[in-house]
Image (cartoon, rainbow, N blue to C red):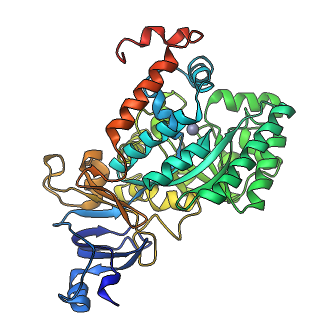
Amino acid sequence: MASSEIDILIHNAHILTMNNNLETFNRGYILIKDTLISDMGPMDKFHFSYGNKIDVKEEIDAKGDLVIPGFVNAHGHFAMTLFRGIADDLPLTKWLNDYIWPIEAKLKPKDCYVGTQLAAIEMIQGGTTTACDMYFHEEKSLQAMEEIGFRGVLGYGMIDLGKATRRAIEMTRVKKFLKYAKENAKLCSIIISPHATNTCSDELLLASKELAEKNQLRIQIHLSETKDEFDDSMKKNNCSPITHLANIGFLNENLVAAHCVWLNDEDCKLLSENKVKISHNPTSNLKLGSGIFRYQTLFENGITIALGTDGAASNNNLSMLSELRLASYIHKGVNTNPEILPATEAISMATINGAKALGLQKTVGSLEIGKKADLAIINTKTPNVWPPHNPYSLIAFCTNDSNVKTTIIDGKTVMKDRQLLTINYKEVMTEAKDIILNLMKSDDLKQYKDKLKFLQ
Ligand SMILES: [Zn+2]
């Protein structure tokens, strides 16, 4: 190999590959060429193979710090960063109807562009390198993600509320976005995104499925998130939302179902039989009082369980480190069993399982030769993780986002030593504040009047 072909060398790193064998390298190296991991292994192999001859464009001496695959956030609504903290301590239906949907209706494409930028910044700072979105004005979200160099999996969220005219509009919009994405996406990919069973007609769900199949894309949907949603389906269809989806032929292995909190035993079986992938979003489920996910039952059924933050209006941040820790703790607690969801499994949920859910397991989710160079370097020399012993334990139970030192996506360093290299975060923060302040001042949004003082 000609030495000049190497773009980035990371050496003296403790590498957690998160591959099938959970292989680690105590003192290891990674070589990145263009967008890919071209070689990796223990330092002994590096010295033997390359000696002192290697000439690289960028050299990172990890000095014993941890290198992990970038996190894969399997479910979120990026531009909702703009709504962070504007309505808390409310149940889902009231939160959506009285606070979120009225202000969302006012969002312009430029607003979603800035909200998505803010999401990407936060996620890069937390070591996330791939994330799945469901929102609107997705052309602008795609533009923001491509400019920053973030691997977005973007979906235009469709809602028809049973109305044929609205359904036609939604289908036109999603097809327009598909066309735009095919012409403009280099790093990002697309996911077809009907919103939920109680906001989409069966006709829209089946049209979404057909569109996904025709374009060989995955589908995401919110599913069995709340008791209300479950009860409504029992009244309307005389069965659970998941049984209903099975009855209309909607469930399959290309479906990523977010939440899945309200499940009966038959639902668990149907999800397993149809190889549906799940995005577990524990913070959002707890904060909205939606309920507790049946992790252990679903895990024992062999279902791929990924992890998502949901939007920043119901989380209220996009930290996968916080999310994986909470997931581990909550299921240990509710099962009164500390052996459930150990550190390795929690990190797998946040990395390779997310990649599997989104159909990207051949390219991201673990550190392997030939895969995309999407990774995070974790600072292990801070008091909150000191002294470092078990690296999995350190990540799952000690670190926070500020321990993420460097983030690389698609072979490009997007954050180095906490410096963002592809975007000015201060400008984005100023713009985001101006946008939300103006929206909350709208004459017809009186519910926000008493919330404006702090922002101003
Ligand atoms: Zn959601």
Q: Which residue is at a point 73% across and 53% down the rendered structure image? A: 251
* Vertical order, 443 against 150 (above or below): above
Q: Which residue is at a point 47% across and 39% down the rendered structure image? A: 282
Whole-percent x, y for residue 20 in the image: 45, 72
Q: Residue 199's quadrant in the figure?
A: top right
Q: Which residue is at a point 43% across and 31% down the rendered structure image? A: 432
Horizontal arrangement in the rendering, residue 100 relative to residue 40 (left or right) = right
Q: Nearer the viewer, residue 14 or 326?
A: 14
* Vertical order, 346 against 110 (above or below): below
Q: Nearer the viewer, residue 58 or 332?
A: 58
Q: Quadrant of ligand 1?
A: top right
Q: Is residue 20 in view?
A: yes
What is the quadrant of the C terminus in the image? top left
What is the quadrant of the N terminus in the image? bottom left
Q: Is residue 126 in view?
A: no
Q: Which residue is at a point 46% across and 34% down the rendered structure image? A: 81
